[in-house]
Every structure is written in C-alpha cells, then in structure tokens.
Amino acid sequence: MLRVVFAALTFLIAAVTLVLAISKTADPDTQRNGSGATWPKSPSLISTSADPDAQPAPKSDDPRVSNMQWIPGGRFEMGALNTVPDEFPPHSVELEGFWMDTTEVTNQQFREFVDATGYVTTAERAPELRSIQPDSELANLQILPEMNKPGSICSLQLSSRDDIDPQKGAYSWWQYVPGANWMHPEGEASTIADRMEHPVVHVSWLDTQAYCEWAGKKLPTEAQWEFAARGKRSGADYPWGDNLKPDEKWRHNIWQGEFPIKDTGEDGFTRTAPVKSFPANDFGLYEITGNVWEWCADYYQPEYYAVSPSKNPPGPESSYDPQEPDIIKRVQRGGSFMCSDQYCVGYRVSARMKGEEDTGAFHTGFRCVLTPDMLQK
Ligand SMILES: [Ca+2]
Ligand SMILES: [Ca+2]
C-alpha cells in the first residue's frame, strides 16, 4: 500500500510549477494592473459562432438535463498567446452541442450518489499509488508510515509570512491532512452539515468517474469546458469579459489580499461558496470560474494544442507532464477560491491546471456534461 502522501506532494509541485511558469513568461508590465489581473491580448481571435437560437437543444424528457444548460455547438479559438506556455498556440476548435451541469456538483448531489451506491472515495481509503505510469521506478516507492493514513490535501492558515519556510516553499501551507475527505473538508473536526449546497471537494478524478457512471453523465473534455466557460466572448480573459472586477463587484469566488497569508474575503467567501452565489455566464453556468477547480476528462499534456484535432478534440491518448513524467495527470480548469492575482491566476478561462488522477484537494471539484447521443431513446 503506497501512495497518497506522494500524490499530495506531486499535486503541490504542480501548483508551484504553474506559478513558476507564469513568472517566467509573463511580462510584469502587462500581467497586472491595480484592479487585478490583466493579460496581453491574443490578436485577431475569431468570434465564436455559438448561437443558442441557431442550434436549439434537442427536445427531450430526459430528467438528467433538468439541471443542465444546453451549450450550442460552434467554433471558437481555444488557448491564448503570451500567457503560460501550455495555453499556446491558440487554435480553432469546432464542437457539437452538449448539455453541461448548471453548477458544480454539490455536496447534496454527491451525498445522493454515495447513499445510492455505497461508494467510498479515494481520500477515505488507505493510501495507495494508483497514478504511476506503467514500468515507472516510482511504483516501488513506499509511503512514510506516519503518513500512511486516509486523508487529503488542505491549505493551512498561516499567521504571517514568517510561517513560510523557504526550503519548503508551497509545502509551508499545503499539507496532507489525515481524516480530510469530502465529508470533512478541513479534517476530522470539520463537517459539511451546513454546506450541502456547496461544491463537493476532495474528490479525485477516479471518484468523478464513479459519480458519472451513476448519474449517466460524463466529464467535459477540456475543449468543451473552455468553450462553455467563454460563453459568446471569444478572446476574453474571463467569462464576462476582460475586466476582473466590473462595476467594482467581484464576479467569482477567488482570493483577495496577500497570498497565502490573508484572504480578506472581499468577495464574500474565504472558502467554498454555495453554488449560484455569483452571476451565471452567457450560457447560464454558475461559478464556471472560481470557487473550485473542475476536473476534465482529458489527460494532461502541455503541448497538446499544437497537434489537437480541430473538431471535437478528445484530449491526448496518454498523460505526459515533463515536470513529472512518471505521474498520470488529468486536466483541471477554472481556478478556485485559492487563486490570487499574485499567484496562479487560474481563473482565466484559458488557464490550464493538472492533477494526479487519484488525488483530490479541498479546492477541487467537478461538473458533468451530457451529449445528445447519450439521451434515452
Ligand atoms: Ca473568496
Ligand atoms: Ca468552478
């Protein structure tokens, strides 16, 4: 029995490496302004051809679509210039229409799934290495005995910058917490009793597959996710446009204040927010950015955009993260309440993240899609 601690550490490394990637590639003069993150623009982005009136949703009595939004097919420019290398190159993608969950999957919905199936999430099981590439030498690693307990990854509350150990870096605040899981988001003493309409967290990609099988849905491809998040605003930084804080109002749940010392909660929340706390995007999707990261179906490869097919791209056939080639990773999108303009800026609609597929965290959840071919006949 091996795994979770190592998985936790690799997840954290992924977060740190994204930050490093941004710091290396972004021009500080154009990365931010006083009101938040403003990024160089991709020139000549084509307009999305998505038009709800042009492609109405197929008529269906299927109950699964009752809490979903129809995302009409269309063509859009996926990716971005001058941001993080794995968002390059911007490329034209054409998608067929699909339905997407109106909100992130909530604790209430996940409770119904667990009650119906008895499913036990990876965070509740004994640690085990499940996301190692075949034939990797890492398969022989052993987890430290003191860490060999069920649990998941949480961010600790720091009291000052002095709490950051230069040797440990991000590990100063990200830690593996025994007993943390979807029912106990901050550890054994915490509860979701008053958070049933919050997004479920601490779910691994493997957990999402079990949920999808029960719900008769599937995870979005990365292309479906970005198309849906952009709405009809091709080329914009955020689902609503290019201004992070239009009319001085926060439009999604992210981090305000000095990261990672003090989240002022100016947007109303310092942890997860109940779904539908912020305005929906053009397609009627709530919290598509911010609140919690959302798992996608795709394996992660940083250079996939250079070879991606233009129509309904399914993602690469295998995982390859050059920074950790032995680890099998899947894509995450949209950023979370932990994202700051001083840090990962993962709430941009083109921003990509990666996670070990058997590892969740207290800021990671998901939402599902349904395609017309999946409708009940
Ligand atoms: Ca917040
Ligand atoms: Ca989200």
Image: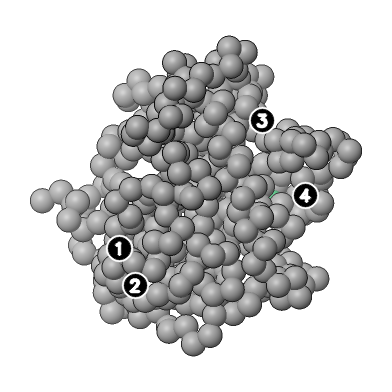
Are dots 2 and 1 in contact, CB under 8 Å? Answer: yes
Give 137 or 249, whichever is nearer the viewer.
Answer: 137
Are dots 1 and 4 in contact, CB under 8 Å? Answer: no
Q: Which residue is mark 2?
A: 93
Measured Cα–Cα span from mark 1 to mark 4: 35 Å
| Residue 251 in view | yes
Element marked by disc 4: loop
Rendered image: mark on residue 175: 3
Residue 241 at what x, y percent from top left?
Answer: 58, 74
Q: Give the residue furthest to the bottom.
A: 44
Q: Which residue is mark 1?
A: 313
| Residue 72 in view | no
Element marked by disc 1: loop
Q: Residue at x 74, y 40 (%)?
A: 169
Measured Cα–Cα span from mark 2 to mark 1: 8 Å
Q: Is residue 222 above or below residue 28?
A: above
Crowd rating for badge 2 (residues with CA inside 10 Å; few <14, some 14–19, many 20+)? many
Q: Which residue is mark 4?
A: 259
> Can you tell me whether the CB of the residue at mark 3 lies under 8 Å from the nearest atom of ligand 1?
no
What residue type is disc 2 on? Answer: Val
